[in-house]
Image (cartoon, rainbow, N blue to C red):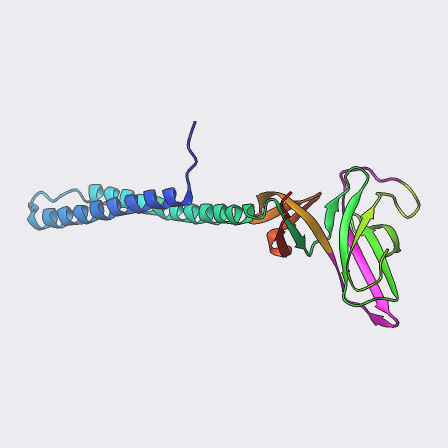
């Protein structure tokens, strides 16, 4: 079984290789200078051999630069997952509206800045089509939970597995009420996607950058 290479391991190996390359290159230049000074004018040294060795040295240096880049990427990924893993088992709140329909249900929270005289919730599918709309169950200021049963406005049942988003619009008289959709729940996993850490919260995959609240679960 091959052991995993950490960012620090990779950086250490690259540093050692660069030190060796620098020493060998300086030795090579010293020998080359000495040979050029003492060569027989009637039988000069073959310059092609020196050119070939210089090319090889350059190739090794280029490989070390590539290793530096890979080491940097490895450190970024390990650091991202390492930091995100601390969220597992904690209750998180994120400004995020996308979730999967599972078991005929999808869950969100929505927050109203002030009490609203009217508030409407809309469920939107992955193509941007509104599949359900209805009045918000609570129009008071604060954070409220909403569970959708996977049915369209016409009453048809949508299959599990689709990704849906919630939209909230609210008014107080003729004025718009500030509102946002939240994903809340216990963090059960982390993963990297496009170089960024994501958290699994219920049926949602949430970017770590969207998390606005975190607290430890009470001891049982």
The image shows a total of numbered marks equal to 0
Give coordinates of residue 134: x percent, y percent. Answer: 89, 54
Q: Nearer the viewer, residue 66 or 155?
A: 155
Give coordinates of residue 19: x percent, y percent. Answer: 26, 47
Give coordinates of residue 103: x percent, y percent. Answer: 79, 37
Q: Nearer the viewer, residue 25 or 67?
A: 67
**Highlighted magenta segment, given as a residue range:** 157-181
Q: Residue at x 17, y 46 (%)?
A: 27
For the question of whether residue 59 can be seen, the reply is no
* For residue 23, side relative to residue 122 (left or right): left
Q: Is residue 177 magenta?
A: yes
Main secondary structure of the magenta stretch: strand
Q: Is residue 169 above or below residue 5?
A: below
Give coordinates of residue 25: x percent, y percent. Answer: 22, 47
Q: Is residue 29 magenta?
A: no
Q: Residue at x 79, y 48 (%)?
A: 125
Residue with the most extreme right position: 154
Q: Residue at x 73, y 46 (%)?
A: 99
Q: Residue at x 84, y 56 (%)?
A: 121
Q: Nearer the viewer, residue 64 or 86?
A: 86
The quarter in which the C terminus is drawn is top right
Residue with the most extreme front position: 220
Q: Nearer the viewer, residue 128 or 8?
A: 8
The quarter in which the N terminus is drawn is top left
Residue with the most extreme top position: 1
- Which quadrant of the view contains residue 158? top right
* For residue 26, side relative to residue 106 (left or right): left
For the question of whether residue 64 can be seen, the reply is yes
């Amino acid at each position: 079984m091959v052991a995993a290479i950490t960012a620090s391991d990779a950086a250490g190996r690259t540093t050692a290789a660069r030190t060796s390359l620098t020493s060998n290159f300086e030795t090579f230049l010293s020998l080359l200078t000495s040979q050029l000074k003492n060569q027989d004018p009637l039988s000069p040294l073959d310059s092609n051999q020196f050119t070939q060795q210089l090319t090889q040295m350059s190739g090794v240096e280029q490989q070390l630069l590539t290793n530096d880049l890979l080491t940097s990427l490895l450190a970024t990924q390990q650091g991202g997952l390492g930091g995100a893993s601390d969220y597992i088992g904690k209750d998180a709140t994120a400004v995020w509206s996308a979730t999967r329909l599972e078991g005929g249900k999808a869950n969100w929270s929505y927050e109203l800045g002030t009490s609203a005289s009217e508030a409407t919730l809309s469920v939107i599918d992955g193509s941007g089509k509104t599949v359900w709309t209805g009045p918000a169950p609570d129009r008071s200021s604060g954070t409220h939970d909403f569970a959708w049963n996977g049915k369209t406005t016409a009453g048809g049942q949508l299959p599990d597995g689709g990704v849906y988003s919630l939209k909230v619009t609210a008014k107080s008289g003729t004025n718009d009420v500030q509102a946002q959709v939240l994903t809340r729940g216990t963090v059960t996993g982390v993963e990297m996607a496009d170089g960024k850490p994501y958290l699994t919260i219920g049926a949602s995959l949430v970017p770590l950058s969207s998390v606005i609240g975190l607290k430890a679960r009470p001891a049982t």
